Every structure is written in C-alpha cells, then in structure tokens.
Image (cartoon, rainbow, N blue to C red):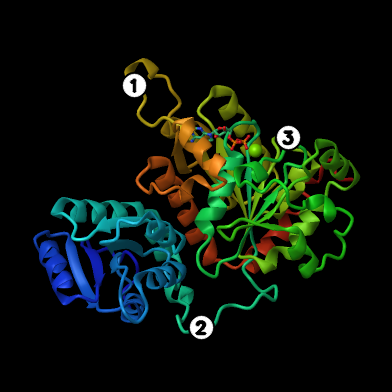
Amino acid sequence: MKRPDDGSDSITIILVDDIQDARDGIQRLLSFEQDFKVVGTAENGRQGVALVQELQPDIVIMDINMPDMDGLEAASRITKALPFVGVIMMSVQDDSDYMQRAMLAGARFFLSKPPSTDQLYGTIRNVYEQYAPIRERFRRMNDPSAMLMDPADEKRPDDGTRAGHVIVVYSPAGGTGCTTIATNLASGLMKEDIKTLVVDADLEFGDVGTFLDLRSQSTISELADKTDDLDAEYFDSVVATHNSGIRVLLSPSLPNVGADIRELNPDAVSAIIEQIRYYYDFVVVDTSHNIDAVVAGLLELATKIVVVVTPTLPAIKNVKLVLDLLEKSNVNKEKVALVVNKAIENPSRHQRAHPTPDRISNYLKMDVTASIPLTDEYFILNAINKGVPVIAMRDPNKPIVKRLLELSDTLYGSMMGTLVEDQETEKSKERRGLFSFGKS
Ligand SMILES: Nc1ncnc2c1ncn2[C@@H]1O[C@H](COP(=O)(O)OP(=O)(O)O)[C@@H](O)[C@H]1O
Ligand SMILES: [Mg+2]
C-alpha cells in the first residue's frame, strides 16, 4: 500500500465527481502540470472513500452533490480516518451554509465549479504544502493502516473507551491567547465521531464561556464536591454543549467561587478530568497564568502541553522559565508544543529587532509547532460576539484561520496514532517531580 509521502515528487490526486465530463475536464487540466498525478477517479462518495482508503492520495478533489453518499459525508469520513489527506471541496453552490457544513465535516478548502486553471493549481499546491507536516508525522508512524477505520463501522459507543488525550494550553502571561487557542483547537479537533471537551480551568477569570457564548449554563462548581466518585451521566448534565457540538465544562461565573475551589481542593480539576477523560477523544484545558497547584496538577496529567508565547521579551523570558521547569520535572520534550501567537513573521524594516517565530525558536531552543499571525482584533471579536471559534468563521483563506486549523491538524495527527496507555508508563516515572510542590 502506498504510504503518505512515499518520497516521490508528484502530488497524488483522486477526483470524485458524479459527472464524467467534470472529471475529464479537471483531469485534462491537471495533466498539463508535471507535479500532479491523478491516481484514481470515483463517481460517488462511497466509491471515493473506498478508493482514498486504498490509495491514500495526497489530495482529494470532491464534488459536493453526488448520489450514493454526498461529498460532505465522504469528506468527513476521509478526514476522520486519514487526517493526512487534504480534501478540497468543489461545488457550484455559492452557499455559505454549505461551506460551514463542509468545514464542520472537516473540509478546509474550497473550489468553485468549474475552477479556473490558476485556482485549481494554486489550491492543490497550497493544500499539499499545508499538509506536509501531517504527512510527515504519519509517515514516521510505524503503521499508518492502523489508523484506518472501516467506513461501515458503527459509531463508537460512549462507554469510556475513547482516546482520552488531555491537551493543556498554558502561558505564564495573561492576554497571550490561551483561551483563543484552546477554543479554536477544540473546534479544529472536532471531526465526525470525535468527541471533544473543553475544560475552563481558569477558575477565577475563565473566559471560555464568553468566547463560546455559553454564559448561563452550569459550571464546575457543581462538581467540586464530587471529585472522588464522578458519575459520567451526572457529568454530562453539568457540561454545556456549544452548537458546534463541542462540550464545555465552564468555570464558575463568580471569581470567589473559583478561588474557594482552588483553596479547598486544588486537585479538583485534575481529578474530574481523570475520571471522565476516556469519554472523550480530546480534552482541551484552558488554564490560568500562575503555576499554582491547579496548573501543576494539570501539567502533570497532560498528554500534550501547548505553551503559548507572544513576541515580547518578557513573555519569551517567562516562557523560557516555564520550559526549564518542565525539563527539570522530566516532562518529555515530545509532549510540549510551542505556539507563537500574535506573530509577525515578516517585520518591516524599522522592526528589524522584532522577535520573529524563528528567533523565538532559536532562543528557546525549541521548534515552533505553529505560529499564529497577529490579526485585526475585529475579526476575533466578531467571532467572540457570534459565540463561535475563529475557525468556524467562513473565511478559510484568512491566515489566522489556516494556522489554527494547521495546529489542530498537527496535534490531531501527532496524537491520534498514539495510545494514552503508552504514555502512561512514562508518566508514572515523571510523577511527583517538581510539580508536586504546593501539593503536600
Ligand atoms: N492572533 C491574534 N491576533 C490578534 N489578537 C489576538 C490574537 N489571539 C488572541 N487575540 C486577542 O488577545 C486577547 C487575549 O486573548 P485570550 O485568548 O483571552 O488570552 P489569554 O486566555 O491568554 O488571556 C483577546 O482580546 C483576543 O481577541
Ligand atoms: Mg484566558
């Protein structure tokens, strides 16, 4: 079977469209360029999914309206089973409702039908390039076919046997973008039949409710005294559900309630997560900015720690201290992902000393997993006002949207193939390292 990124230079493509003329037209356009190679065509979604599973192309160009499994359903199955395959949706519909459904189905890229030659070539090359890191990770995984799910599979049951990855988003400074990143990450990790929970562990000044417009729901304070024996059904009754399907455990709406929980039982949040994590594939945790006992417990529990830094000297210096602390506590380097937010990648000449993501990476001696560009605040505010993550806004070509999606896909790719159990053994070794401070 062909592996993702088998080293050959051409971009392998599968076309799925029920109209033969449409397939032929695109195939002809693609044949003019050396780097494209159409490895298969299918005439409906079902055939398309089967062919994509068999051939594992780099790119799928997918019509939306088709008999026998439409393009949205097919795209969702493909992105769920093979996250390293870039799916480009193609449709005559100029309908934003369609676009949103397509994005929720996991599609990130769109072509109008029929596409112009430039659009077609540009989009394919762009998507191919964006998926490079994900393909690379999957190539390095021993057996990519282990990821395959049979599309005929029933939905997985909710019996606490999901992946249970815990992603903790942390920054030592406020205003860095932790909440922005946590909510968007959760949204980007939502694929069909992937269950994602956001936990707002900023007990006193949690903002997740504001970002997702979930103000009036019940909160973690209802669970604070039930951390020893938490019933999954009861938990379900406390979490809020965003209309995108993300579940959210909100922080208390009054700061003093949060302070009380923190004082009485700093392990409450970790204990809750321990008990319900396997009912979810991903638990994304937004944190406060002090390394207090709550955060320490969460860092210990995490299967992935996303450390967020902005390009200012104090922020970088403080993140360095945090990275040193993690290292001293024997946290596996692989577990830490550095994200530069509000990044300016190409500073103008009078900003020559600006700490670009490259410089930050050099200074911190660590790869930057993603850099999220500084964006006009209006775009983010607009999303917040609508109560949706930025990436659910209908602008897949906006750089911030692209980067947040890439970050989600990279983390998805790096985590879904690994079992939490594998990391568990290693975790017990790490346990009670430096992080045990403040917990005795
Ligand atoms: N990439 C970005 N570009 C511009 N503004 C951003 C970006 N990321 C976040 N912001 C804004 O910065 C502010 C702080 O973000 P937030 O996610 O609340 O940070 P934190 O949770 O770390 O305190 C918010 O007003 C948010 O809209
Ligand atoms: Mg916040």
Q: Quadrant of ligand 2?
A: top right
First of labels 3, 2 by sequence position: 2
Q: Is residue 40 left or right of residue 256?
A: left
**Quadrant where the C terminus is found in the figure:** top right
Residue underneath mark 1: 348
The answer to whether one can see residue 27 in this image is yes
Q: Quadrant of the N terminus?
A: bottom left
Category of crowding for the residue at label 3, using alpha-carbon neighbours closer than 10 angstroms: few (below 14), some (14–19), many (at least 20)? some
Q: Spatial distance from mark 1 to mark 2, Cα to Cα?
A: 53 Å
- Identify residue type, mark 3: Asn
* Residue displayed at 61% across by 31% down: 175
How far apart, in angstroms, are the residues tagged by discs 1 and 3?
34 Å
239 up-or-down from 350: above or below: below
Task: Please tell me how crowded label 2 is: few (under 14), some (14-19), or many (20+) other residues with Cα within 10 Å.
Answer: few
Comparing marks 1 and 2, which lies closer to the viewer? Answer: 2
> To which residue does mark 2 refer?
153
Q: Quadrant of residue 151?
A: bottom left
Residue 309, image x, y percentages: 55, 34
* 288 relative to 279, above or below: above
Which of the labelled discs sits on residue 290, or is there none? 3
Vertical position of residue 183 compared to residue 256: above or below: below
Q: Of the residues under marks 1 and 2, which one precedes in the sequence? A: 2
